[in-house]
Image (tube, rainbow, N blue to C red):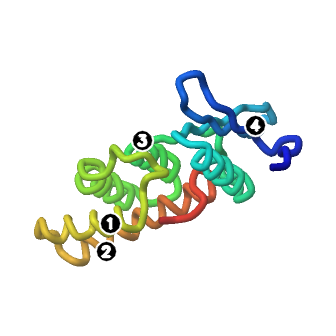
C-alpha cells in the first residue's frame, strides 16, 4: 500500500489495540488542529479517515465540535432573534422547548438523520398533536438544520 501524501491524514494503532485516524485541519482562524476518530479495526479507521476527508472537502468545520441538537437549537434561536418578529420567535422557542428537546434534544447534531426526524414526527402525531403542528415542527427543524449546513456544522440537511 502506498503512503499517504502530506496533509492526507494518518492511521496508527494505540497500545490498547484501538486504531486511530487523524487528520490535520485548519480552523476558521487559520490554526492547525488535529481531528481524531477511533475504531476497532484498521479497515474502520481507514473508513473514518475517508469520512473526515469527505467532510473537510464538503466545507464542514471539523474543529467546531459536535454539540447536541438541543444546544445547537438554543444557539440558533439566539442568532435568529433579530430576524423574526417577537411572536414568531416565541413560537419557535415553544416548539423547541416543548416538542423537540424532550424527545431528541440530547442527540449529537451529527446523529440527527431523516429516520430520527421521521420518528419524532410520528411520535408527535401519536401523542395527538395536530397535523399542522407536526408540519410546523418540521419547517422549524428544516430551517434550523439548513442554517447548520450554512455554518459548516453539518454536511447536509437531514
Q: Circles 4 and 2: CB distance less than 8 Å?
A: no
Residue projecting furthest to the front: 1
Local secondary structure at mark 3: helix
Q: Are there few (<14), some (14-19), or many (20+) residues within 10 Å of tag 2?
A: few
The tag earlier along the polypeptide, 2 or 3, is 3
Q: Circles 1 and 2: CB distance less than 8 Å?
A: yes
Q: Are there few (<14), some (14-19), or many (20+) residues within 10 Å of tag 4?
A: many
User: What is the distance, in whole Å, between disc 3 and disc 4 at their CAs?
Assistant: 26 Å
Local secondary structure at mark 2: helix
Residue to which mark 3 is pinned: 71
User: What is the distance, in whole Å, between disc 1 and disc 4 at their CAs?
Assistant: 38 Å
Compared across the picture, whether 99 is left or right of 87 comes to left
Q: At which x and y percent is residue 99? A: 25, 56
Image depth: mark 3 or mark 4 in front: 4
Q: At which x and y percent is residue 76? A: 48, 49
- Residue, x 72% and y 40% (percent of image)? 23
Residue to which mark 2 is pinned: 135
Residue to which mark 1 is pinned: 137
Compared across the picture, whether 25 is left or right of 121 comes to right
Q: Are there few (<14), some (14-19), or many (20+) residues within 10 Å of tag 3?
A: some
Residue projecting furthest to the bottom: 131
Q: Circles 2 and 3: CB distance less than 8 Å?
A: no
Q: At which x and y percent is residue 132? A: 25, 77
User: What is the distance, in whole Å, between disc 2 and disc 3 at their CAs?
Assistant: 22 Å
From what the image shows, is residue 96 above or below residue 141? above
Compared across the picture, whether 63 is left or right of 112 comes to right
Q: At which x and y percent is residue 20? A: 62, 35
- Residue, x 33% and y 47% (percent of image)? 105
Amino acid at each position: 500500500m502506498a503512503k499517504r501524501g502530506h496533509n492526507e491524514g494518518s492511521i496508527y494503532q494505540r497500545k490498547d489495540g484501538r486504531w486511530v485516524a487523524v487528520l490535520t485541519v485548519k480552523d476558521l482562524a487559520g490554526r492547525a488542529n488535529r481531528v481524531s476518530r477511533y475504531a476497532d479495526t484498521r479497515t474502520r479507521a481507514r473508513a473514518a479517515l475517508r469520512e473526515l476527508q469527505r467532510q473537510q472537502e464538503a466545507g464542514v468545520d471539523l474543529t467546531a465540535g459536535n454539540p447536541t441538537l438541543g444546544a445547537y437549537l438554543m444557539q440558533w434561536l439566539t442568532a435568529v432573534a433579530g430576524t423574526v418578529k417577537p411572536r414568531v420567535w416565541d413560537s419557535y422557542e415553544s416548539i423547541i422547548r416543548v416538542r423537540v428537546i424532550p424527545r431528541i434534544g440530547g442527540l449529537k447534531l451529527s446523529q440527527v438523520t431523516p429516520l430520527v426526524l421521521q420518528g419524532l414526527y410520528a411520535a408527535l402525531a401519536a401523542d395527538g398533536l395536530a397535523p399542522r403542528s407536526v408540519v410546523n415542527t418540521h419547517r422549524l427543524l428544516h430551517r434550523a438544520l439548513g442554517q447548520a449546513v450554512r455554518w459548516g456544522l453539518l454536511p447536509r440537511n437531514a
